[in-house]
Image: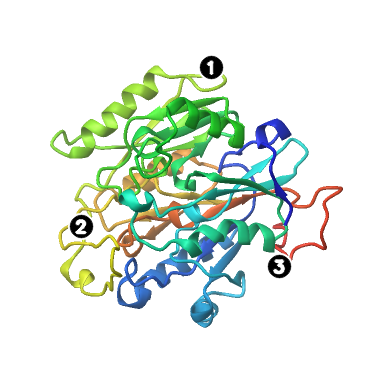
Amino acid sequence: MKRLTSLPAIDGFYMPGEFEPHRGCIMIWPRRPGSWPFDAREARKAFAQIAEAIADSEQVVMLAGEDVMDSARRMLSDRIQVVQMESDDAWARDVGPTFVVNEHGHVRGIDWQFNAWGGLVDGLYTDWARDDLVAGTFLEQFGYPAYDARHFVLEGGAIHSDGEGTLLVTERCLLSAGRNPSLGRMEIEEQLKNYLGAEKIIWLPYGIYQDETNEHVDNVCAFVRPGEVVLAWTDDKNDPQYEMSLADLTLLEQETDAKGRHFTIHKLPIPKVPVCIREEELSGFVFEPGEDQREAGERLAASYVNFYISNGGVIVPQFGDEHDKAAVRILGECFPERKIYPIYARDIIVGGGNIHCITQQIPKGEAHEKGNSGSGPDEMLPECQ
């Protein structure tokens, strides 16, 4: 792997929008007993359904530990590329690389430091060594030049780009004590601008209530195209989410993006009935010492904003809730050029995240640039038609 010590922005690279063309998508086959109850039985069905929906329009690379390779191959169609790679859990958005592109169609990856969403301060498990290696290992195996950003703790769910210089983040996440405590807000902005080619950072105050990632932005607000976002919303003033979403809305209404545009904001309802852990689900977990544990009745951070944009579709979480259909309708209006795939995702949210959290897009473009050294990747990711 070509490991780069320069800065992407100086090299002319930037983070594209998720709505731009993809070469493929990274996922990780679930197995961690503290995240996925009953040996990930139901979670794997949901992961497979999501992978197949994405595979309708782009290549899916499913990473799997040695002990679950057979399970992945058995439950996935031949359209899915299953690759052996070890990890601690299945959150590809957060442990996989963030990809950046340039105007010549070249693609490079960024290898951030991962510390389980807060390290020893408020991280969700005590040993994340294998997760922390996933990004670098993937880039090496698939032949992408890698920017070394391992001095900086960041997860893919903490950032959302419009591909035109604007980045969405939340204060609660990026300023949390367990990530980069020695850096202030301006210093964090500098890192984001240097590595993601951002010109303007929009700091939303909050994410989703009870989000154990310290309120990742990808659960509360997402770009559907430059200058246009969806925002998780509730009209119930008694819901803790109301004041949080109202604060985000107020800020977005006052802000402009890097191009000076005011935002078009689509309110996307959260589930009408809070999604909570059931007693029967709780009995299926096996927690390690020091791992964050679920409790019966615990409210989960369920949000329809946690969707994935594929080349030809939008894969939308469903919760068996009254607002499921409204979410599908609103996102269908936001993405008229794409097919909407509503997928029941309760079996993912019990693990603490959702569809966007378990996926990481690879932008369309060339991984190999003229003058690169090395004999090429061990695994070849085919170009999508």
Q: Which is more foreground, mark 2 or mark 3?
A: 3
Q: Position of residue 21 (x, y in %)?
A: 64, 46
Across and down, in percent, residue 76 comes to 53, 74
Name the element at disc 3: loop
Whether tag 1 and tag 2 are in contact, CB under 8 A, the answer is: no
- Kind of residue sitting beneath label 2: Cys
Which numbered disc, 1 or 2, marks the residue that appears first in the sequence?
1
Q: CA distance from mark 2 to mark 3?
A: 40 Å
Residue shown at the point (26%, 33%) measured from the top left = 244
The secondary element bearing badge 2 is classed as: loop
The image quarter containing residue 222 is top left
Residue 379 marker: 3
The amino acid on which the numbered mark 1 sits, given as a three-letter code, is Gly
Q: What mark, if any, has residue 260 been given in the picture? A: 1
Image quadrant where one finds the N terminus: bottom right
Q: Which amino acid does the dot numbered 3 rest on? A: Glu
Contact (Cβ within 8 Å) of mark 3 with mark 1: no
**Local crowd at mark 3 within 10 Å, few (<14), some, or many (≥20)?**
few
Tally of numbered tags: 3
